[in-house]
Image (cartoon, coloured by chain):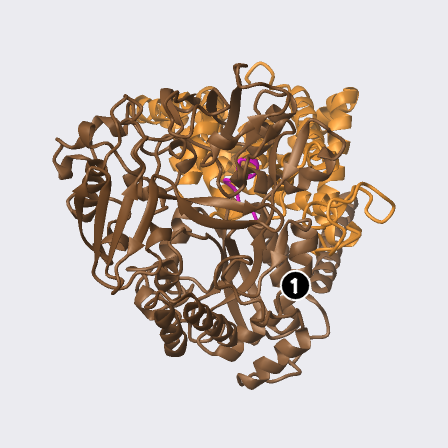
Amino acid sequence: MQIVQDLETVEEKKVGMLHATWRRFKKNKASIAGAVITLIIVGMAVFAPLIAPYNPEKLNYGKELQPPSWNFLLGTDPGGRDILSFVIWGARTSLIVAVGAILIEVAIGVLIGGVAGYYGGVVDEVLMRFTDIIMTLPTILLLLTAVSMFKVRSIVLIMLIMGVLGWPWMARIVRSEFLSLKESLFVEAARSLGIRNLRIIFRHILPNAISPIIVVATLDAPFYIMYEATLSFLGLGDPTAISWGNLVAKGKNVLTSAWWVATFPGLMIFITTIGLNLLGDGLRDAFDVRARI
Amino acid sequence: MKKKLINVILLAITTAQMISALISPAFTAVEGQPIFTLHILVNSADSLQLEMASALREEFAKIGIQLEIVSMEVGALTDRLYSETASSYEDGGWDLAFTTWWWWPTDYMWFIGCWTASGWSPQGWNFMRWADSLADTYLDNAMSTYNKTERIKWLHLWQERFQENPPVALIYWPVIPQLSDAKLQKVDPMLWTGNAWQWYVEGKTPEDNVVIKYSVDGDPGMLNPWFMDGGYAHLEPMFSPLFRMKQVSLEPPVYEIVPELVESYEFSADGLSVTFHLLHNVTWHDGTSFTARDVVFTFEAILDPATGATSYGDFSEFVDSVYMVDNYTVVLNLKKVAPHLISMLSAGGLSILPYHVLGGVPHSELRTHETNTVAPAPGTGPYKFVRWIKGQYMELEAFDNYWRGRPFVDKIILMVIPDPITALQALKTHEIDAIHPSQCQQLINEIPSLKGLTDIAVRGGVVPAITFLAFNNNHTILANPYVRKALCHAIPYEHIINDLLKGYAERANSPVPPYWFGYNPDAPAYTYDIELAKHYLEKAGYHYPLPTTPLSAYTTEIITTAICTFIVGFLLGYFIIKRKQK
């Protein structure tokens, strides 16, 4: 039993690993920039009610399509809503959708990838061929089809659908991690002690495979934000939601006369995506999982 | 272990709070307990409906009614509107919805299908399920006499009754801007391509080869006008009914029904049969001459239920039989008095089709005949069919032997451009010459930016259409006329017309468009008046002032965020200090 306890207290070592990772992460200016951008966006989302100058749904009668001014720093939309407030609140929607979808993706991906990688053989074959089938389908088309099956769409529904369709890549990464880790000595030791398979998967292998999971999740986040915006832009989202994509769609109809409606939410999508991408790249380098992803 | 559990619970509460804030961000909600909640259905493809619904949500909150906006695709929306069993949103139906109805050229007959108990869905268009015996009597009286003054009297009474017991909140008559090349004249927002033979281009002579490109938002479903349900822009230049709509004045826009293929007509003394004397000099596009035989063939085919023509119901309700007196005289026997007959005969669905081409086809096979899909049968219109490339364009060519003479414009190309903004860009670069009015309506925000362009003309006026907020009269709450009146008074009409539509609409006081036969200018219009709305709700049995909460939903959201931030910050700080201590 002593060995098991030793195995489970690898945590102390992890502090050292985290330090090393942080040192590597720090060296890259781009990753720091990505982290700062992401932090700002997350801050915007969390403190939205405190920093937005107006209620984002308040219609200002007679102030429709106003250009940027001191009253409305980024102008107003065709309904007279303040675009700055809308964009700040939109960060909340985008991030919650992305985080929600990632949680679902991780849950499904780790389960399928872990089981496939650990057990191998027929289980692996079946699960991985299924994963391949889903991977061959273009994600955006799959999303469009899935979303258009629902007549009334909410932002939560879109989050669920994106998460449920987004796991194959995660499953593959997790599987490859598991393939190499299950041959390592500590797993063999655990197995020789008669520890149950599921406990080995989740308690012994998974903590060691956490870095590629974090990296893949971070790199997937901008995609979810973009997909949500794309669906909203195409009118397949929830038109009543405070979402950047919805505002871009509204702005598209007045693009030549009111450029500010589509520009600012579009810019926000761009900045958020780039921030998360830089952060993800930085994490990948820092965790030193480049060879594996 | 216990501490860990408490922390997890706190974090879970915070996350749940964040997510719930996302799911229902009803910031404009009623302060306190709403007296009742209604759902409004909006078409997800129509951004204007969403803006109007947002405005209503703010206004209804002021009188204590919580309005939930439900956006759905037009198919699902229609299913809900015409659902037979459901009486509210909760059980699969609807409470409130925006609708725009275009005036059908069937006179007030159409109103019987829309606003009387006999027009209840699914037989008719009355999905509001409004029933008012007094109003029904007025309308029936107006439809059972040929006497014009008598009809006007009943119609005026009907319109007053309509506003007294409102089945819907009338909002506006749309004013449709017709965007076109400034040189192109006579393009009409109501007639679309129906008057293409009148179009002409300034600075060109009839000898020049003039090609007009007209943008439309989609393909026609079929090339046979009998089975069409919309898409007339493609077929109107090719086929003609016996009568047509004509614009008699542009400002104010007045339309009238005038003979097209008919020289003269007279009703019999009892009003139960009509004799039509047809024009002699009309030829079909293939050179055969147009005679009474074609008219008889058309009406007999439409009267046969086996054909399945779109206008079968409207037509067979009044027309008993049709026979030919000589080559240019046709008699129509009626089942009952039909004051709207002439208007009805101007509908595109009653266009005359050639006997010499389709006469041999059994009636039941007309719907699937090859002339419906590949190339249409010859017509009598000013333009003949050249080619149709699905999803791209349809090309029409001027007909040399058109009975009015060859039209000025030599070719009309109907370009499919589904996106209005793309159509506008194409108009600016002179790739097209005119935009279909239904697309122009979505471009009103762009019109101010066109002011400086001399080569683009913005014309148009009030079209015979009405936009209203429909109430489900079957709904337990909305069945009370005082509630409906209260809602009518809580609509910000000025804001919708001046700010959202930029003035491209006129405040409506009647479902009948202005300048139209039977319109009652004295029918009362509802004003935006919150106090009056509250007054009516009190009459309906709801009491003010409402019990209020001290904080609005938006303020509550701000405070919860602050508290959540504090909790999370505290937890983080606690963990960091603990770790440092280790």
From the viewer's side, name the closer residue of B27 and B449.
Answer: B449
User: What is the three-letter code of the residue carrying label 1?
Assistant: Pro
Q: Is residue A232 magenta?
A: yes
Residue annotated with mark 1: B492
Residue at (28, 64) in percent of width and height? B337
The residue at the far right in this view is A70
Quadrant placement of the C terminus of chain B: top right
Quadrant placement of the N terminus of chain B: bottom right
Look at the picture and state if B98 lies above or below B161.
Answer: above
Q: Say if residue A224 shows up in the picture.
A: yes
Q: Which residues are magenta?
A: A231-240
Q: Position of residue B566 (x, y in %)?
A: 75, 56
Q: Secondary structure at mark 1?
A: loop
From the viewer's side, name the closer residue of B372 and A287.
Answer: B372
**Which tint was used for chain A?**
orange
Q: Is residue B172 magenta?
A: no
From the viewer's side, name the closer residue of A74 and A291.
Answer: A74
Q: Position of residue B185 (x, y in %)?
A: 59, 31
Prevailing SS of the magenta stretch:
loop
Q: Say if residue B582 shows up in the picture.
A: no
Residue at (32, 68) in percent of width and height? B144
